[in-house]
Structure formats: C-alpha cells, structure tokens
Amino acid sequence: MNKNIAIWILLLMFLGCGNSGNINLKIKEKPSYTEKIKSNNNSLFKKLSTNLDTMFETMHSKLGLNACVLVAKGTTILYQHSFGYANKENAILLNDSSKFQLASVSKVITALAILILYEHKQIDLEKNIEFYLPDFPYKNITVKCLLNHRSGLPNYLYFLNSEIYTPNLKMDNKIMYEYMLAKNPKEYLKPNKRFYYCNTNYALLAMLVEKISNKPFNVFLKDEIFTPLGMKNSCTIADLDLNATQIAKPYDQRWRPVKFDASDYVLGDKSTYSTAYDMFLLSKALFENKIISKETQQLAYTPYSREKINSNYGFGWRMNNFKDSLRKEVYHNGWWHGYRTAFHRRLSDSVTVVILSNQLNKSAYQTYKVFQVIDDKFDSELNVDED
C-alpha cells in the first residue's frame, strides 16, 4: 500500500470521529501508525498549513502570484488564502468571495453537464452531431469526439477573428454557430485522427445541452450543478454583473486591465465564473460520487489519445501520470483575457488544488509544489515504512 494513502485514510478517520466518543481502530501489523497519528493529527495539519502558507507567500512575494488558493483532502480544507488584488485601481483585495472567470476550467463543468444528460439517457456519446443539430455540415463527428478533442474541427477563435473584434457585439453560441455555418471553414483534421485541442468543441457541447434539455445553458448549470452542490457564487457570464465588487478584474503582466471582446459571451469553452471554495465543493461532490456516478466519472478520466505518451485527455479533463493508479492526476488549466486558473485533483488520495488568478502570471500553474509539500510533510513527520 502506498504510505501516503494509508496515512491520509487513517488521519481523516480520526478527524471524522473526533466528536464520536471512544475510537477503536486496530492495526495489528503496524501499531506505530495509530500512535503517531493520535499524537500528531492536529499538529500535523497545523504544520502542513504553515508549510503551504510559506510556499504560497513565497510565490506571492517572489513570483508575483495574485490569486485565491485552496488545498483540500477529501472533505477537509487544509489551506485557503487570498493573495493580491481583485481591483488594482481601487485597491480592492481578493477574498474568499472573489469570482474569477474560469477560462478553460469551464470545460470541466461543460463535460459534466453532458455526462448528466448521458446518465439520464438523453444523449448518446457515439451519435454523430448532425443527429442533434441537423444542419451541422461536418460528417462523422460524434459527441465523444467533441468531449475528447478529437473532432478535427477548426477553432472558432481563429476563423471568426475579425467578427470577434466587432464593436459592441456579444457573440453568444447561436451567433457563433450561424457564423460557422455561413463560413463553413475547412476541417483541421479528419475526425478522430488525433488529439487537437479546440474551443469550438465545447461551444458546440453547450449548444447540445440547450437543445436536449430545452433549457438555456446557464440555467441548466444552475439547476443541475450549482444549486444542488451549494455553489452559490458560480454562474456564467450571462448571469453576471461584471461591475460587481466581488468580480476579480483581469490584468496583464504589467497590471494593465484586459478588455473583453465578442467571444467572451460564448459559453461552454470558457466564461463560467466561480470561487475557489465553490470549485472545492465541485471536487468534493465528484469524490463522493454525487451528480454523476463513479462509473460515469471513469469514462471522463479515461485517456482517449494513444498518440499522447506523457499526458492525455478524457472528457473535459487533462491528466498526468495517467498510467499510474497512485499518482494519476486529473486537471484542467485555463488562460483567458488576464485569467490564469488551475483545478487539479489527485484521485488516489482525494487531494484538490485550486488556484484562481486574475493576472497573467504563470506561477498559477505551479500546482506540483503543493503536492510536494503535502507528500514531503507526511513522509518526514510520520516516517512510516512502505508495506
């Protein structure tokens, strides 16, 4: 058994039973596990939080990290803090309620919406898109191909480049689709030939959600995901007051405000807003097999691109160490108009890392440092041998 997983399980069992009276946990082969965790669980969490704080403070002071961060294990938040400005001009600091444009982390939520319909037997992942959108001009592209970025479709952010900068245009998914039909751009690749990351895929998935559910995409997310999970500070740009004080404004590397364009109003591939805590609630629900089943989640965490050796893509999730059941990490990063976001989950021990930044600073992607702090702390403090 991996020592970190064993330690996590025992530690959380003690924390969860803290108010339940006597604890009766018998470990015959290694009694030192129990004694060390009994004496160290509170101090260990405190030390772990301190180490994480030191790490993030260093990233803030030396690397310029401007973000809300949260680290959790299962249902337990290990560390949560905010660093820097939500609104630089007015000296408004980030806080736990600050809402960020999730950028491409939105794709996790869009894929979840499709999988909800899949579990309800309302959508067939193997059906071609024209089954649901009869005027769709491209052949042999399945719903699955959109989910795992193997459609070969061109990216609308490129073939609609001039339209995107039309003054005062709010290009929703319908407008984007009408432009796409009118221009009929050539496919980038043949369907399912290889992985090609493309925002068009997820904008079309949002349209499928609307078509099949008979609800606007933003309403479907609210009804089926945000409200059931208590994600009170999550919505799409369609439901957002961009001038509200809790909105983290986007900035470039030099703290210049980043302007929006017409494509900001296309949903599915981006333009979902949330907080670090709400994203923790989403991760927690997935670990608890709420919203969709464990079996359906496994479809999302399956690598679908054999040509990708060191990393891969499932349904709305990238993955690292996908061949290692203990180290496998499913995640998505985002980069859009001043926002850099990271949502990482290690499946074997239910660790969640959320970093939401509103400034173009690549330190927001250094989630590996968090896993190093967690693993190194438990190894050094408990000093438990491998089984």
Image: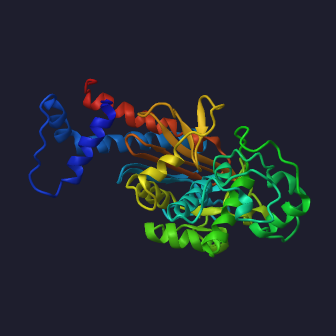
- Tell me the quarter of the picture where residue 365 sits: top right
Residue drawn where x is 63% and y is 75% of the image: 214
Please name the residue shown 44% across and 70% down the image.
228
In this image, 367 relative to 130: left or right?
A: left
Q: Is residue 100 visible?
A: yes
Residue at x 48% of width, y 61% of height: 278
Res. 138 image quadrant: bottom right
Where on the picture, by quarter, is residue 382?
top left
Q: Going 21% across and 39% down the picture, which residue do you hit?
A: 40
Q: Nearer the viewer, residue 124 or 386?
A: 124
180 left or right of 268 in image: right
Looking at the picture, tell me which residue is in the foreground, 290 or 120.
120
- Whole-percent x, y for residue 168 in the image: 84, 71
Tally of marks: 0
- Residue 159 point in image, percent of width and height: 87, 53
In the rendered view, tell whether residue 170 sits above or below residue 114.
below
Quadrant of the image containing the N terminus? top left
**Residue 43, can we see it?**
no
